[in-house]
Amino acid sequence: AHTVLYKPTPPPNEPTKTMWTLDLVVPHGSDTWKLLSELDERNIREGVTKSLEWFGRSMDEDGVREVYTPILRFNDKQNIWVARVKLNVGEKGATKVFEHETGPLGENIKTPSTYDSIQRGSKCFCKLGSPGLWIMNRSFGMSLYAKSVLLFPWCEGGDGDDDDFEFL
């Protein structure tokens, strides 16, 4: 399972904000890391191909890399890879949050939970989607959003197993 590195708290002046972000640790070399790295590279290639249309001038790969905001970012302070994921905490299209429990017969049970149960250090699996690329002035990137989050509240550690994310 992945670890929640950062979760913002609602600022007092924005109590009705409906989109929040989670920074999730993605173990280097995991299937998730490979997939997100491949998406970053594909987006950069697309940026080179469409640079004239998107940025008003033809750009080579180095130029596109300079304006691309990668999905995966390396956190130098903690020596880890991080992916930023958006969560919809509003009523329309809200991210579903569940907690994993083990039933009396060893079965897996998903219990509905709330956004407030997601804490820094939480272990989770996320089902992700993407609305696509965003392009602004001289930068672009790909947004990811969590369709659902499955928390493992009893799990303090994590070995970064593969298949922690599922793309729709």
Image: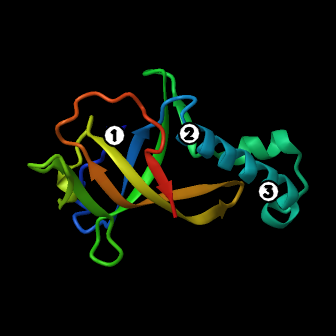
Name the disc covering residue 31, or none.
2
- The residue that mark 3 highlights is 46
Q: Secondary structure at mark 3?
A: helix
In the image, which is nearer the foreground, mark 3 or mark 2?
Answer: 2
Of residues 149 and 103, the one drawn nearer to the viewer in this rendering:
103
Q: How many residues crowd mark 1 within 10 Å: few (<14), some (14–19), many (20+)?
A: some
Looking at the rendered image, the disc whose residue lies closer to the viewer, 1 or 2, is 2
Q: As shown in the figure, which amino acid type bears the numbered disc 1?
A: Tyr
- The amino acid sitting under disc 2 is Asp
Find out whether the residues at labels 3 and 2 contact each other: C-beta distance under 8 Å.
no
Q: Hey, which quadrant is residue 55 in on the image?
A: bottom right
At a point 17% along the width and 46% down the height, the residue shown is 106
In the figure, is residue 104 to the left or right of 143? left
Q: Residue at x 88, y 50 (%)?
A: 59
Residue type marked 3: Glu
- Disc 1 from disc 2: Cα separation: 22 Å
Q: How busy is the neighbourhood of tag 2: few (under 14 within 10 Å), some, or many (20 plus)?
A: some
Residue at position x 65%, y 61% in the image: 136
Task: Residue 149: give x, y in percent of width and height.
Answer: 32, 55
Viewer-nearest residue: 56 or 164: 164
Residue 105: x percent and y percent? Answer: 12, 49
Numbered disc total: 3
79 left or right of 61 in image: left
Q: Earlier in the sequence, mark 3 or mark 1?
A: 1
The one nearer the camera, 83 or 1, is 1
Question: Counting residues from the N terminus, which is met first, the one under dot 1 or under dot 2?
Answer: 1
